[in-house]
Image: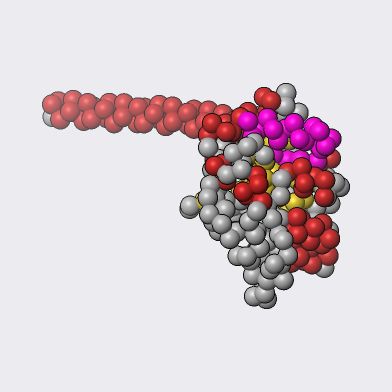
Amino acid sequence: MGGITSLNGNVELKTTANKTKKKSLLKIIGIILGGLVLLWGILYFFPVPKISEHPYFENDRPLVIAHQGGEHLAPSSTLEAFRNAADLGVDVIEFDVHITKDGHLVAIHDPTVDRTTNGEGIVNDMTLAEVQSLDAATYFTDINGENRYHDQDVYIPTVEEIFDEIPNMRWNIEIKDSNYPELYLPIAEKLWSLIQQYDLEEHVLIASFDQEIMDMVKEISNEEALVSGGRKEVTKFVAFHKFLLNGLYWPTVEAVQIPTQEGSFDLMDPKLIKGAERIGLDVHYWTINEQNLMTDLIELGADGIITDRPDLLIDLLEK
């Protein structure tokens, strides 16, 4: 009987010890979880410097940004497209730049002239005369299947010609990373020089997928240029806001331009818009050509919509 009593006592002691250990473990887990929640709260609500408001982004509705001047309405990145976009009343005209062999910046989306002209060749390997001798409207058909620009001497314009032709406009200019890498710096220097020459520092947003190009622009301009984030900057912005770590993202750009979907990530996310608004960062979506998607982005609170069909977006906003 004494042995049984002793055994029962040992069992009770072990049970009590196990309960104490479990309570201690749960307490430690609770402290860790509480600490993580507190850390998350600090990271989420940590005050991040807000970007100063800039007149370029002022609008009481999403900016209507005509992609390549509105490529579904007129030949891509031509004076004809830009005039048409201006006549429609767009807020911003977007185009891409490549540099010719003799150092001229021209508006063309592709690294070659093959798709949008009647010629062939890499823009970086061609002179301005060679590029501008080509017909930049032969490929084009509009939404009705017609090409009213055929045989109208449509050509690839220089940036100077664009600025001369349409002086009162906001521009979104992308330095294409399809230029030869050794030409990135000369392109950035030339573009900023032209922006200064035409007093357009307040009217041009410079973009590129390559963050190094954006960093070059910032350095060349002594931080004066308005820039949109490259891939690395956009990835940081999306990742930190998707995982609710807003306080870890300190913006180094004035805008981010993103698609509605990237892989499995839905980028039409209110968290992104609210997070960007909190720090004064503009969010523009590309390239949106369906009215139902335009409507969704307007309701979401997008700051700008890049589209090949600015006519549809303007019609929607006016309604």
Magenta-colored stretch includes residue 199: yes
Q: Is residue 214 found left or right of 281 in the rendered image?
A: left
Q: Is residue 238 above or below residue 136?
A: above
Name the foreground residue: 152 vs 26.
152
Q: Position of residue 54 (x, y in %)?
A: 81, 37
Q: Is residue 207 above or below residue 91?
A: above
For the C terminus, the image quarter is bottom right
Query: In the figure, residue 82 lies in which quadrant?
Result: bottom right
Whether residue 118 is visible, yes or no, is yes
Q: Position of residue 244 (x, y in %)?
A: 58, 39
Tag count: 0
For the N terminus, the image quarter is top left
- Residue displayed at 70% across by 67% down: 151
Magenta-colored stretch includes residue 249: no
Q: Is residue 64 found left or right of 138 in the rendered image?
A: right
Q: Give, as a single range, the part of the protein colored magenta.
A: 186-208
- Residue displayed at 76% across by 65% down: 311
- Residue displayed at 14% across by 25% down: 2
Query: In the figure, residue 282 lies in which quadrant?
Result: top right
Snapshot colouring: secondary structure
Q: Position of residue 284 (x, y in %)?
A: 68, 49
Q: Is residue 280 above or below residue 305?
A: above
Name the foreground residue: 284 vs 93.
93
Name the foreground residue: 37 vs 125.
125
Whether residue 291 is visible, yes or no, is no
Name the foreground residue: 14 vs 40.
40
Q: Position of residue 31 (x, y in %)?
A: 49, 28
- Residue displayed at 57% across by 44% down: 126
